[in-house]
Amino acid sequence: MTQNKENNKSHESNAEYTKEQQVLVDRTLAYPECMYYDILEVPRLSPIDVISKSYRRLSLQLHPDKNKAPRAEEACKVINNAYDKLSDTESKHLYDTVELPNIEERLRQRNRTHSYSAEAEQNSQNQTYCDHQQTFSRRRTIFERMDEDFVKLVLMLGVPILILLLYPVISYMFSSNEIFMLRRSGVYTEQRFTSVRRIPYYVKKGYQPSNLQAYHDLEKNVELKYYRIKNPYS
């Protein structure tokens, strides 16, 4: 009897891991993988600095080089995944504002009508909610990208068409008070030439100067505008 006790004590002293290490591994793996705050042992919606501090503590306690308990490496991967999700600002914001509220609400609704007697059953149900919410989040992201692509396509195709449709109207609004244009534009479609230098210009269809002086003034203005554009610094 005495020899058996001594053997047990010797076996315990030679154990590669402690009871506390095994408890930590089991507790980490007991949470559904989407319950990131619980896995990292911090209050929900904690800031990133608090999350980082707890993660460093747990990573040291669960690292396979330090913790030889069964499934310690698996538990270490679980906390790494949780930290990856919550250490990124954009990922954390999405989780806090979309995924976590949906998970908590579904759990509250479920708890109002059902009572769980076994912890394993509750964890299984939580995992189902997590999987459903992650699928919903992925679908939501896909639809958002589709909406963004559709808006970009509409802008790429619609803006040039709109410009083409509005160009004649805008051109008419800004040029309808002019007697002539040096280029065909809007309502200025009838081409004419000055009598001496044969400079081309355009007037409204059927336009005729009211008198000879108006005709000379028109040709003079055409030539002035033509040479001013051709030699802006002269």
Image (tube, rainbow, N blue to C red):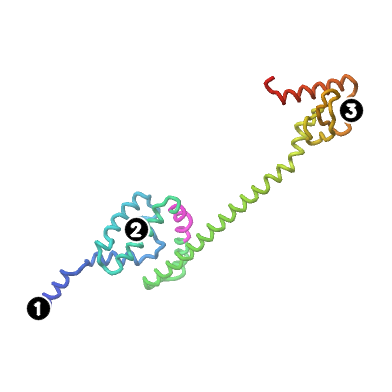
Query: Image quadrant for the N terminus?
Result: bottom left
Give the residue drawn at x 43%, y 50%. 89
Give the residue drawn at x 33%, y 58%. 41
x, y percent for residue 69: 26, 67
For marks 2 and 1, the one nearer the N-term is: 1
x, y percent for residue 220: 81, 21
Residue 40 is tagged as 2
In terms of secondary structure, where does tag 2 sit?
loop
The residue that label 1 is drawn on is 3
Give the residue drawn at x 46%, y 65%. 131
Q: Is residue 161 above or below residue 114?
A: above
Q: CA distance from mark 3 to mark 2?
A: 87 Å
The residue that label 3 is drawn on is 208
Q: Nearer the viewer, mark 3 or mark 2?
A: 3
Queried whether the magenta region covers residue 94, the answer comes back as yes
x, y percent for residue 227: 74, 23
Which residues are drawn in magenta? 92-102
For the residue pair 47 and 160, the one nearer the viewer reads as 160
For the residue pair 168 and 218, the one nearer the viewer reads as 218
Q: Main secondary structure of the magenta part?
A: helix
